[in-house]
Every structure is written in structure tokens, then in C-alpha cells.
Image (tube, rainbow, N blue to C red):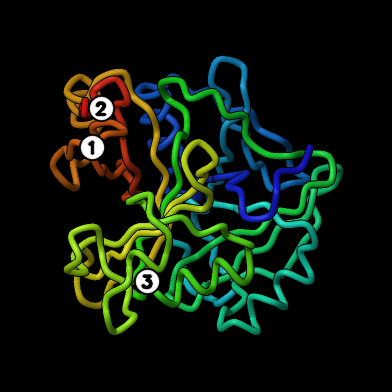
């Protein structure tokens, strides 16, 4: 059954170092890769414990629709009810189209846009294939998050185009997170941390973070994926052993201990040890 519009429903990795990437994720997460055949460009399904959890594509030597080489990255796809209408709505709200809607036979329709803050985001209209299987287990995706350099624009865009049901992380309503001048502020009232989710509480399925203070000058906004691991330190030791990089030091949160890493080809992701969540 298709997910509601705005729900993360698919993710895939485009890589220029397919062999190294396959080895890395197989050893780190226990993934298996199944080639879907020449008719779909040898796109591969990623399986964990028999469940389809992601896609994988060898992009070596390919250029994107803009003519530039494709850099290694994880792409997130949000469910939509009508891909043509949603792409037009996205354009009306300042997005540009990176990849026009195309049909995947017996599965659905996909497109990729660049939102007004510079982040790539995919759209998926299910017609037979609803997306990845959520299990919440080690080695599988557990959270999706936009790091935005223009938080207010991003919130307005995803609300208008993808029907995001905006809930502030503090648990208060939007008005309670605004100062006397009406500008959004963080939980401490100083504007240092602003975070919203699509849906409140257990209904939350994705987040938007004001990353102005975290991303370097010149960096674009981007979506990232969190994958569960059983424990942080053994996972990081494995990342180093397999040729990956630790991008940032582990950070504790009520949802788990999070560490941003890069795979051997440079694609970034977050490892989240839910078992190590802060107890409040």
C-alpha cells in the first residue's frame, strides 16, 4: 500500500566505486545485493535479512541530467500521490527539476528535484512497489533528515509541496517557538537549535534541521540517512578497518548515539546506536 505523501519511502546509493561500496556495506551491515537486470541498467536491490531496504547503482562514467559527473551520495525519496502534479507544485515553490518523472515498469514513477535550499530530494509514486521495508533493526534505515542552510524556506517548501505536518521538536506548537518579532527560535529561545519533524511523536517520519551553524560556507543543504547499529565503538572500528572515514565524533541524544561517517567512495551517512540512547 502506498505511503502518505511526504513519507520517506525509498533510498538509494549512487556510487562510482561499486565494488568497494558493495564490500563496505556487506561487511558493515550484512547487506546482500541483487542485480535487477540490463533493462534497468543493472540497478541492484539491497537486502537485509531478506527484506528490501534500499537501492544501489553503479554510476561510474555516467553524467547527471545537468551534464556533470555524478558524485557519490545517498538519495532519499518521498512518497507522492501524483508525481506530475507534485513536480509542478515544487517548481512553483522554487525547486528545479534534476530528473524528470520516469516510469519504472510494474513499480512506479520517480523524479528527482533540487529544493529551493539546494538539497536533492526524490519523489516516488508507487504503482506496485511501495518502497523499503522498515524493521528498525541493525543495518537498516531508521531516520531521514534534511540539513538546511535556509530553514524557514525549507519548512515552507516541504509543507506546501509534500504536505509535511510540521511539529517542533520541543513538543510545543509553532507559535511557542517564535520570539517577539515572530522569528522562529530554538528550544533555548536563542535560535541556536531549530528542528521540526513531519508528524509529531510516534507519527514523525522525517526531520528538518537548521544547519546554518553546522555546515561550512559554500556547502549546500542535503538529506541524510540514519542506519541503526548495535553499538557505536565496534561499528566505528569496522568502518576504519573497511576504509571508511569518521566525519564527526559520536553525539549522544535521547534517540541514540549518532556518528556521521563516509564510505570509501565518499558518500556520507549516520550510524545510530539506538541501544545507547540517553536516558532522561
Q: Is residue 253 visible?
A: yes
Position of residue 28 in the picture relative to residue 79 (left or right): left
Which badge, 2 or 3, is on the more N-terminal residue? 3
Question: Number of callouts in the render?
Answer: 3
At mark 2, the secondary structure is loop
Give residue 94's quadrant in the image.
Answer: bottom right
Query: Who is closer to the viewer here, 174 or 11?
Result: 174
Which residue is located at x 18 percent, y 59 percent?
Answer: 188
Q: According to the image, label 1 marks what residue?
A: 253
Q: Position of residue 169 (x, y in %)?
A: 36, 51
User: Between marks 2 and 3, how big is the CA–CA gap?
Assistant: 26 Å
Which residue is located at x 32 percent, y 41 percent?
Answer: 270
Outermost residue on the top side: it is 49
Q: Residues within 10 Å of mark 2 (few under 14, many from 20)?
A: some
At mark 1, the secondary structure is strand
Position of residue 43 in the picture relative to residue 172 (left or right): right
Does residue 46 sit above or below 127 in this rendering?
Answer: above
Position of residue 30 in the picture relative to residue 92 (left or right): left
Does residue 53 sit above or below 246 in this rendering?
Answer: above
User: Between marks 1 and 3, how big is the CA–CA gap?
Assistant: 21 Å
Q: Position of residue 183 (x, y in %)?
A: 31, 79
Query: Who is closer to the viewer here, 126 or 212?
Result: 212
Q: According to the image, label 2 marks what residue?
A: 277
Q: According to the image, label 3 marks what residue?
A: 151
Amino acid at each position: 500500500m502506498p505511503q502518505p505523501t511526504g513519507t520517506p519511502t525509498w533510498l538509494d546509493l549512487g556510487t562510482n566505486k561499486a565494488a568497494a561500496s558493495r564490500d563496505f556495506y556487506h561487511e558493515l551491515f550484512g547487506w546482500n545485493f541483487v542485480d535487477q537486470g540490463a533493462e534497468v541498467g543493472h540497478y541492484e536491490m539491497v537486502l537485509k535479512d531478506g527484506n528490501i531496504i534500499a537501492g544501489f547503482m553503479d554510476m561510474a562514467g555516467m553524467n547527471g541530467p545537468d551534464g556533470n559527473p555524478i558524485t557519490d551520495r545517498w538519495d532519499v525519496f518521498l512518497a507522492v500521490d501524483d508525481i506530475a502534479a507534485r513536480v509542478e507544485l515544487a517548481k512553483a515553490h522554487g525547486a528545479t527539476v534534476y530528473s524528470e518523472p520516469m516510469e519504472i515498469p510494474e513499480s512506479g514513477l520517480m523524479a528527482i528535484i533540487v529544493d529551493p535550499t539546494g538539497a536533492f530530494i526524490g519523489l516516488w509514486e508507487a504503482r506496485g512497489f511501495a518502497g523499503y521495508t522498515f524493521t528498525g533493526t541493525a543495518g537498516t534505515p531508521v531516520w531521514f533528515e534534511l540539513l538546511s542552510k535556509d530553514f524557514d524556506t525549507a519548512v515552507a517548501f516541504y509543507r506546501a509541496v509534500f504536505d509535511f505536518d510540521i511539529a517542533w521538536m520541543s513538543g510545543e506548537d509553532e507559535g511557542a517557538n517564535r520570539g517577539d518579532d515572530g522569528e522562529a527560535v530554538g528550544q533555548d529561545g536563542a535560535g541556536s537549535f531549530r528542528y521540526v519533524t513531519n508528524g509529531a511523536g510516534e507519527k514523525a517520519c522525517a526531520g528538518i534541521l537548521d544547519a546554518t551553524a553546522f555546515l561550512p560556507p559554500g556547502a549546500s543543504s542535503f538529506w541524510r540517512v540514519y542506519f541503526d547499529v548495535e553499538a557505536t565503538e565496534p561499528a566505528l572500528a569496522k568502518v576504519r578497518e573497511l576504509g571508511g572515514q569518521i566525519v564527526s565524533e559520536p553525539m549522544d541524544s535521547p534517540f541514540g548515539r549518532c556518528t556521521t561517517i563516509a564510505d570509501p567512495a565518499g558518500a556520507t551517512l549516520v550510524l545510530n546506536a539506538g541501544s545507547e540512547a540517553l536516558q532522561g
